[in-house]
Image: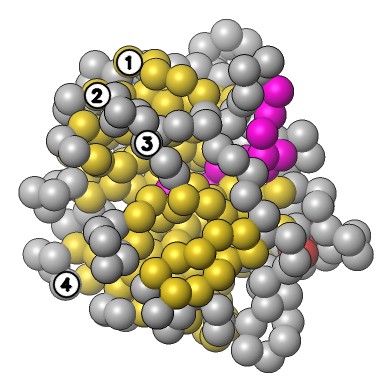
Amino acid sequence: MAITIQNTEPRRDTAGDIIDCHDGCLRYFDGRYYLYGTRYGDTDGFTQANRYVVYSSPDLQQWTHHGDLLDQPLDGVCYRPYVVFNPNTKQYVLWFNWYPVLWEGQFGVAVSDSPQGPFKVVHKSAPVAMPQPGDHNLFVDTDGTGYLVYTSIKGDEQTRHGMSVEKLDPTYTASSQENSGVFATRVEAPAMFKRNGAYYCIFGNTCCFCPQGAGANVYRSDSPLGPWTFVNDINRDAEGKIIVPGQQTDIAELPTPDGPVLIWMSDLWESRLDGIKGHDLQHWEPLTFGPDGHPQPLRAAQDFTLAL
């Protein structure tokens, strides 16, 4: 079956409501697609009203809203929920970034026996190697090893928001403290994947809720813990102008009859037509790759067809 995914209108759930699910991820578990994100509603995004939510779909078209992701919301400002499945524990593991006080960031960790939750918090402040954690994402290697890619927002004007990759323990609920070291600064919103034996990490410049969009800097490595080498920026054209006015939130790996497809996902901040932040659009499009194996510049596709 082939479906068409469009980027010009708000996506809606089966109740007809606009999907309010931002700065999270899209996952495929047991024959169903799950969209995890932050619900902002009619706020500026910096309040304790933020909630983690999940939607699911059999076909990336019909989305069912399952409500809050956590069994109990935390008393703080929450962003960026990312979920992976642990084949050893048979549990779904959620890492999220939250601030009891802005901007004193912590990583919370929660687990569930179901991809739609509810997730139960097992760590409110999971220790990691780098101080004052910020944006992040999760990656599971083909050998089952889990990794956390994240920024440390502490530092001066030149060194803050430093990006690194860190190995998780076998349960994915804690860090092993094995860290790559910082390989880029003043960046955020990462995603990591593996293709043809090479590891790629993509993220942009700091761009919190910015309407103009951020770059998408590609780094490559032969190992998850580096060393990492800059390749290109796939969200800037030859003149250095932003191609898609969005900030990356995830790169989703989805199965198709011809093999996995990697979908670049971004939030188009301030794109809402009714003034409600939670109604900002998202832009999705498949990554393309050149003869060298590296991701190619984005095309700002208004829609695309995907075989399921």
- Specify few, some or many for label 1: CA neighbours under 10 Å numbering under 14, 14-19, or 20 or more: some
The residue beneath circle 1 is 229
Q: Secondary structure at mark 1?
A: strand
State left or right for residue 23 relative to residue 164. right
The span from disc 3 to disc 4 (Cα, nearest Å) is 33 Å
State left or right for residue 42 relative to residue 294. right
In front: mark 3 or mark 2? 3
Q: Who is closer to the viewer here, 175 or 181?
A: 181
Q: Position of residue 3 (x, y in %)?
A: 50, 74
> Tag on residue 90?
4
Q: Are marks 2 and 4 in contact (CB under 8 Å)?
A: no
Q: Are marks 3 and 1 in contact (CB under 8 Å)?
A: no
The residue beneath circle 2 is 221
In front: mark 1 or mark 4? 1
Comes first in the chain, label 2 or label 4 = 4
From the viewer's perspective, is residue 297 above or below residue 230?
below
The quadrant in which residue 20 appears is bottom right
State left or right for residue 220 relative to residue 14. left
The amino acid type found where label 4 is placed reads Lys
The amino acid type found where label 2 is placed reads Ser
